[in-house]
Image (cartoon, grey):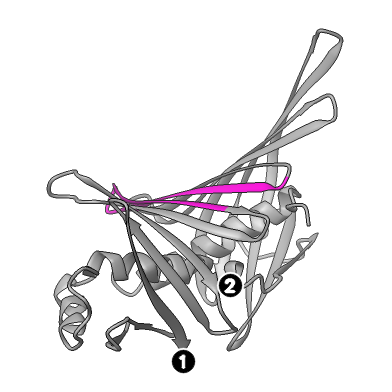
Amino acid sequence: PPVNTNSKEMYALSAMSSAMYLQQELPAISKSVRTFSAMQNETSRPESITEEDVNGAKNCITMFGDIIKNNGYTQTVEENTDTSEELGKYNFVMTISLPNVAGTSTYKLYYDEIATETNTEIEDEETETEISTTLEGVLIANEDHFKVEGKKVIETEGDETEYSLEFKTYIDEQNYVVVEQSSESNELEYEYEIYKNGVKVQNIEFEKQNNETELEYELINLTSGVKDTTIYKIKSTDDTKFEISLIRNGTTQTFYAEIINDEINFIYDNNASQSV
């Protein structure tokens, strides 16, 4: 089936996946690496799979797991009737519902599209139109409130239409996620930049084409500035399980993940496992 390029669907997906990531960051923006290491040492995970590999796979499944499983989230937009000081200034509210193992997660995006600009050019008897729109709002996930900003651009040339979107979700000015999306025909691409304490720490490229999902995960070492790029090819094997192929330097390693009681349990080919 063709990829859905409806701009509201793109807003919904950006908001949902960003919230999933930021909510796990909220309890401690500067998480203790030592705690994570201690959890690792309880297992006999293969040495070729590092802590960073596991953390990267965890982030990918947290943000994209339900999308990979194609659970079919829904979004509806209504006129905003909330009169509170924080939310009453926005004209619209989008309710995003995502079925998952625990039931249904619901997110609310209160927003306004505050400026629209249209540019039209005629070249070789073909009309090119570019429409850009700016968005401001607040995203609510459970009880957590995140400021959001966005911009969408729709380019039409003849009978071809291309969409692009930038969407920022903030814990605060130092900790946020930037999502850039583009889509044409049957291909949908996302790029996620994750900033922690004002510094970009991760870059994730997500591509979905004809129901095949591929994630390219780039972890930036804050001490050396070196970028370590790992490709994860993730597919869903049933409602709670994923097969992960980790590709680095031309070598592929395969391991599995299962979601149990909101924790991700990784299972390796030497039968070791660990929960994160």
**Which element is circle 2 on?**
helix
Label 1: few (<14), some or many (≥20) within 10 Å?
few
The residue lying at 80 percent from left, 59 percent from top is 79
Farthest residue, direction top? 124
Residue type, numbered disc 2: Asp
Residue 246 vs residue 110: left or right?
A: left
One can see residue 262 in this view: no
Q: Which residues are magenta?
A: 186-207
Q: Nearer the viewer, residue 249 or 180?
A: 249
Residue 66: numbered disc: 2
Residue 176 in picture, x, y percent from top left: 40, 54
Residue 220 in picture, x, y percent from top left: 25, 49
Q: Which residue is mark 1?
A: 261
Residue 40 vs residue 14: left or right?
A: left
Which quadrant is the N terminus positioned in?
bottom right
Residue 81 vs residue 45: left or right?
A: right
Residue 262 in picture, x, y percent from top left: 46, 86
Position above or below: 47 against 193: below
Residue type, numbered disc 1: Asn
Q: Nearer the viewer, residue 39 or 47?
A: 47
